[in-house]
């Protein structure tokens, strides 16, 4: 029976299909040691596998049960994925505590913060956007203000972005009428922030959602057969974001990840030149330059990279956002370590603060 199941996994891993619905649930992840990049393309072409965080030494690969046996059979050398200690994990707020902090901030700053629940996760946790603008109850006059969006923690084990977004909400609200720049920002822009798109993954400290699905490989992708902008049959977290996006007119956005230090710009799925290539490079470079530790990357020149040139991603939110909604989006990898010591989070926020605010302000020029 065990051999039969393993054979089925091997067959599935070799099966070439493109529909997201055909993928097996993810449950294992390792880091492949591959300085020559011999295996990136081979494994990346398999739809049951997810490649991430390619660097000069290798890359991460995630797959269904049986992945490590499969890699052993193929003679591919790998090491265990990053595994933070239980003590370190316990130092981070739970998804419920994170939501509680946002709710407390809304009660403290009701004239600036509006909370919008766009849906629930597989396990029933709320997906909660905070909208910051002044005043919060501006009514129909809000339609004249551009809409900007930050989303973090769509990979549950990439946690720093979630904490940074909670800090940003507090920072903007507390500095209103005290900091001229922040005051002007909230007087002219609607800033929407979703600190955690995958609270179930954060709770379980895993990449994927509670169904074993990688949310950043599950959006519609016009370069595949999954090329209709239809939310039916997708994960609840995906459906919620798709519906929210369709109801708004976002001009600029970013999503935050962890495992590298780089600003990644589209396209991710194809080698074609992005229609706004010069603009998106400028925005990416400005973000990286103001976050000097990203700009000084030893892996990426000036801390930026084209997505496809780094590694191909099908079904990513970044490409979907622009292709179907004209919402220019970049992906910001914040830290090489997904779960750094909690004390590092505050330092990382301060290192990114100028970049975060400057990127929001850029929506006024679009």
Image (cartoon, rainbow, N blue to C red):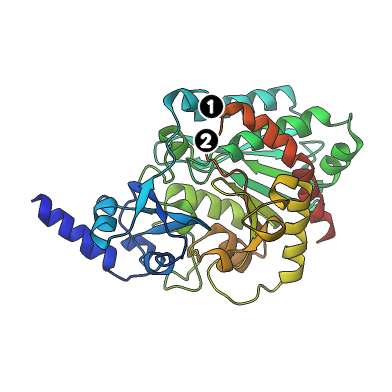
Q: Is residue 347 left or right of residue 40?
A: right
Q: Quadrant of residue 264 in the image?
A: bottom right
Residue identifier under label 2? 339
Name the residue: 77% across, 36% down.
137
Q: Where is residue 283? Give x, y as percent.
A: 76, 59
Residue 190 appearing in the image:
no
Q: Where is residue 342? Give x, y as percent.
A: 58, 28
Q: Where is residue 195? Give x, y as percent.
A: 60, 39
Q: Tell me the crowding category of disc 2: few under 14, some 14 to 19, or many 20 or more residues within 10 angstroms, Cα based.
A: many
* Label tally: 2
Name the residue: 48% across, 65% down.
314
- Vertical arrangement, residue 159 with respect to residue 288, above or below: above
- Vertical arrangement, residue 133 with respect to residue 308, above or below: above
Q: Residue furthest right?
A: 180
Q: Where is residue 170? Give x, y as percent.
A: 72, 29
Q: Is residue 12 left or right of residue 80?
A: left
Q: The C terminus is located in which quarter?
A: bottom right
Camera-side residue of 343 and 276 = 343
Please, what secondary structure does the residue beneath circle 2 have? loop
Please, what secondary structure does the residue beneath circle 1 have? loop
Name the residue: 46% across, 56% down.
58
Residue 62 appearing in the image:
yes
Foreground mark, 2 or 1, reads 2
For marks 2 and 1 on the same chain, the one whose residue lies earlier in the sequence: 1
Q: Are marks 2 and 1 in contact (CB under 8 Å)?
A: yes
Name the residue: 61% across, 50% down.
255
Q: Tell me the crowding category of disc 1: few under 14, some 14 to 19, or many 20 or more residues within 10 angstroms, Cα based.
A: some
Q: Quadrant of residue 34 in the image?
A: bottom left
- Vertical arrangement, residue 82 with respect to residue 216, above or below: above
**Image disc number at residue 92:** 1
């Amino acid at each position: 029976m065990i051999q039969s199941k393993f054979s089925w996994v091997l067959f599935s891993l070799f099966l070439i299909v493109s529909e997201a619905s055909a993928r097996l649930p993810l449950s294992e992840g390792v880091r492949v040691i591959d300085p020559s990049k011999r295996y990136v393309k081979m494994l990346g072409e398999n739809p049951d596998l997810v490649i991430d965080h390619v660097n000069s030494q290798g890359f991460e690969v995630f797959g269904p049960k049986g992945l490590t046996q499969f890699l052993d059979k193929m003679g591919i050398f790998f090491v265990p994925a990053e595994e933070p200690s239980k003590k370190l994990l316990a130092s981070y707020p739970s998804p419920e505590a994170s939501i509680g902090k946002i709710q407390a901030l809304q009660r403290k700053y009701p004239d600036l913060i509006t909370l919008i629940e766009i849906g629930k996760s597989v396990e029933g946790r709320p997906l909660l956007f905070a909208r910051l603008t002044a005043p919060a109850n501006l009514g129909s006059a809000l339609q004249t203000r551009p809409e900007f969006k930050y989303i973090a923690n769509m990979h549950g084990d990439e946690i720093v972005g979630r904490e940074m977004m909670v800090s940003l909400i507090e920072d903007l609200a507390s500095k209103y009428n005290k900091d001229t720049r922040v005051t002007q920002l909230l007087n002219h822009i609607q800033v929407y922030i979703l600190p955690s798109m995958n609270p179930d993954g954060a709770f379980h400290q895993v990449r994927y959602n509670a169904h074993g699905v990688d949310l950043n490989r599950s959006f519609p992708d016009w370069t595949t057969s999954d090329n209709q902008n239809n939310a039916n049959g997708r994960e609840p977290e995906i459906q919620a974001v798709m519906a929210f996006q369709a109801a708004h007119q976002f001009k600029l956005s970013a999503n935050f990840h962890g495992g590298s230090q780089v600003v990644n710009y589209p396209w991710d799925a194809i080698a074609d030149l992005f229609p706004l290539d010069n603009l998106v490079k400028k925005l990416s470079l400005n973000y990286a330059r103001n976050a000097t530790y990203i700009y000084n990357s030893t892996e990426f020149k000036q801390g930026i990279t084209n997505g496809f040139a780094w590694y191909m991603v099908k079904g990513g939110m970044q490409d979907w956002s622009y292709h179907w909604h004209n919402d220019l989006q970049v992906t910001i990898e914040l830290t090489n370590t997904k779960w750094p010591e909690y004390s590092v989070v505050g330092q990382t926020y301060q290192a990114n603060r100028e970049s975060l605010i400057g990127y929001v302000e850029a929506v006024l020029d679009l």
